Structure formats: structure tokens, C-alpha cells
Amino acid sequence: MKTKGSVRIQDTGKPRINVVTLGCSKNIYDSEVLMGQLKGNAFDVVHEAEKVGKNDIVVINTCGFIDNAKQESIDTILQYSELKEQGKIGKVIVTGCLSERYKPELEAEITNVDSWFGTNDLQNLLQSVGANYKHELIGERMLTTPKHFAYFKIAEGCNRPCSFCAIPLMRGKHVSKPIEELVTEAKNLARNGTKELILIAQDLTYYGLDLYGKRNLDDLLRRLSDVNGIEWIRLQYAYPSGFPMEILDAMNERENICKYLDMPLQHISDDMLKSMRRGITKQKTIDLVNQIRDKVPAIALRTTLITGYPGETEQDFEEMQQWVEETRFDRLGCFTYSHEEKTHAHSLVDDVPDEVKQERSDAIMEIQQGISLEKNQQKVGKVFKVLIDKKEGAHFVGRTEFDSPEVDNEVLIDANLDYATPGTFVQVKIESAEDFDLYGQIVK
């Protein structure tokens, strides 16, 4: 999540549209598409400008996933509403998941927002500011990430029945984008200097069922792999139930498909998995992880877990702890359970105290910290292909194919000893390792 600081005021007299993005990579993608459309309509568009002008239209793309994200979105809306009240900006428009989910309540509580739009209201939002939706701009975006990598949304919505998740309420049913459209978008990005596509969706592995009658992610991967200039393709948000093993064949065949898979597993206790409506058991989960590792031995597996789900006993939690220790995921994140209205789990009693949820999450992350350190130490002395993301302080900061931006490990290169251009690939020999960082030197 991004945290909003105080907003500095600037009076340029020039109207423009300032898009503020909260939440996940899917929201980043949506904001980029919105800004591409606005730019195509000859608007002056900026992303999260530090200074605002009195004629600015501020569009806030909100997150409504869990309590902390919802609060951040509300705080941001109030912040810009106050600036409008003071005459320091022109209009405030709210879009995204929070607006989709709570529009009537928000309209009643925050009355000086000019317009509220949901997740699928792009054309209406554009019309509200005097812009037209331009079909010829499909695949055109105004990137907010460094141009060498881009989030690449291949589908919208989700058909899964997970009890804890409100995403289907906010994003609707799964809708895949056609392969041809995605290939065109990838070619446009590559022409503009993008080298890494990070494939995102609520559920990547469901891709194609609605369009082609079968899971078609492997076909899409091969088509994207053929796009000239794309050197890395990364998979995020796979679902374990019904996992299409053929995508691993594509991973083995193509060098530019990263040996990396982000597959949120949420829990391992059979009781918890059943109540969560995950459609998989403990043994099937263990078998799947083993099969993936057997098929792609060098793969980096990232997962996400939830602690404090309703009814989670100490035994359920200890079972998850032991499984995390035994499975040794390369990357792991942990959330505390958030009791979300209109989800299936909301009918259950939220009976695990918040402090216990947090203690359990911290315990899981402590285990993972040790695993990550051990795995990083095994990389010392080895050479890796590294994509340089930026220069920060005294270091150039990059990533291996086993790391996604923002959430995973980084490779730090001493800028006093080496020089690297952000957006380029270099070979780096790892000299030392910490829990979540590697330190190395460029191999000439």
C-alpha cells in the first residue's frame, strides 16, 4: 500500500487530471489504462502529483479489499474532499473497488465528491470529464511503473467461491481478454521499452475457460514469449484447485518465462480449507507443490497465507506453522483475517482476537525470515541475471527472475564499485546475503 503524506499546494491555473492509485497491481493497471485514455483525449494527466492546482480534477482509484485498505481509501477521499472544500482543487472523482462496493453509503457520508464510479465504469468516468472512450487505444497505457516492467492484466473478475474474499462483489465474474488483444498490447509495450511483463488477474489459471472452453494460459504464454523485446514473463496470482500443469511445460520450454509462480494457498488445515471453500485438501496441496517442484526444479514459489480465520484453533495454526517449516517456500506473505461484509465467511463468528491474529502472522513471518536467509546464503558465490530497477542511495537495486517488484527480494550493487543503467540486464555475482536482500558485484 502507498501512504499519503501532506499535499503541497500549487496554483498554476492550468486544469489537469491527477490520478491517485491505492491498492494492488490490478488497480495500478486500471489507472494506467484510464490515464492512457485521458491522454488520448488530449488531457494533461499526472499520477499522484505532490502539488495540486486549484482547477485540478483528482480521480482517486480506491481499494476495498480489507479493513486497512478501506480506511486508507476513505482517508484519501477525505483529504482531497477537504482541499476541494477549501477551493484548492476543482473536482474530486472516486472510482475503483471501494466505490463499487460501498457507493450508496459513501455518497451519503461524503457529500462533496463530484462523482462515484465502480470498477467497470471507465466509459462513464471518461464522459464525466468530457472525454470519449477510444477503442483504437486498446493496449495503450500511461505507465506508472518504470518503463522496463509493466503489470499485464489478462482477465478481470473471479468465479471462485472463497468464503473470505469480497473480490467477486467488486470485480464481478471472470472475463478473459482475447489472446490477440493481449499480444497487441504486449507488442505496444515492448516497442516502448518494456522488457518484463508481470501477468496479473484475480485467477491467472482460470484464463481462457470462458473464451476458449479450456484453460488456455499455456497458449497465451507461448504467444507472449514470441513477442520481440520481452525478456521476462512473470506469473502472479495462480489458484491451486484445477491447476493447469501444462503452463510448467511452457516455463521449461521458453527462457523468457521466469521460473517463478505466485500461488496464494491461504492455509493448510483441512478444516480451514473446507470452511474457506478453497476446493482443495491438505494432501492435494502438498502433492501439487511437490509436482510443481518436480517439473520445474529451479522454480521460486511464492505464497500468501491468512491467520485468524474464524474457527482457527491453536492446532490449526500449529499445523500451518509446521507445514511452512517443511515446505520452505521461496517467498511468503501473511495477512490477518479481515471480516468482510457480504462474504460467505461473514456469517461465521470472527472469534480469533486481533492480537492473536497478529501474533500468529508474526510467528509465520519469523519462520519465513529464517528460511529466506538460508536460501539466500545458498546463492552466495553464484552468478545471476539481474534486471536493474533503480539507483537508491549508494546502491543500484535490481531483481533476479525469482523476484517480483515491491514484494520480493532485491539485489543491491555498490554504486561506488559498479555502474548499471536502470532498465538493463547485468550478470551479478552474489557476494553476501541477508534475510531478504542479496549483495553482489557486476561480472564484466
Image (cartoon, helix red, strand yellow):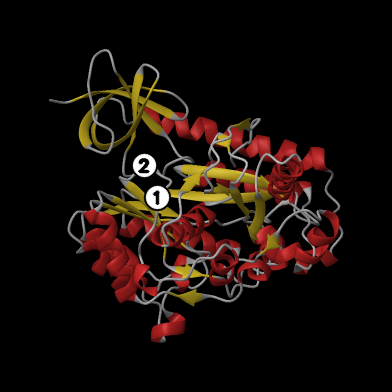
Q: Nearer the viewer, residue 158 or 420?
A: 420
Picture quarter containing residue 282? Answer: bottom right
Query: For the N terminus, which image quadrant?
Result: top right
Query: Residue at the front extreme?
Result: 13
- The quadrant holding residue 380 is top left
Q: Which residue is found at the position 65% from the left and 67% from the top?
A: 170
**Residue at x 75%, y 67% (from the top left corner):** 343
Label 1 close to label 2 by CB (< 8 Å)? yes
| Label 1 secondary element | loop
Q: Is residue 56 above or below residue 369?
A: below
Residue 296 is situated, as x and y percent measured from the top left of the image, at 31, 56
Q: Which mark is residue 146?
A: 2
Q: Identity of the amino acid at label 2?
A: Pro
In the displayed structure, would residue 85 be above or below residue 393? below
Residue 76: percent from the left, percent from the top?
69, 44
Residue occupied by mark 1: 143
| Location of residue 417 with respect to 250 vertically, above or below | above
Residue 164 lies, in percent from the top left, at: 71, 62
Label 2 Cα neighbours within 10 Å, binned few <14 / some 14-19 / many ≥20:
few
Q: Secondary structure at mark 2?
A: loop
Q: Residues within 10 Å of mark 1 (few under 14, many from 20)?
A: many
Quadrant of the rendered image containing residue 322: top right
Residue 436 location, x and y as percent?
46, 30
Which labelled disc corresponds to residue 9?
Answer: none
| Alpha carbon separation for disc pair 1 and 2 | 7 Å
Relative vertical location of residue 379 with respect to residue 290 in this rendering, above or below: above
Furthest residue in direction left, as rendered: 444
Instruction: Note whether residue 246 is visible.
Output: no
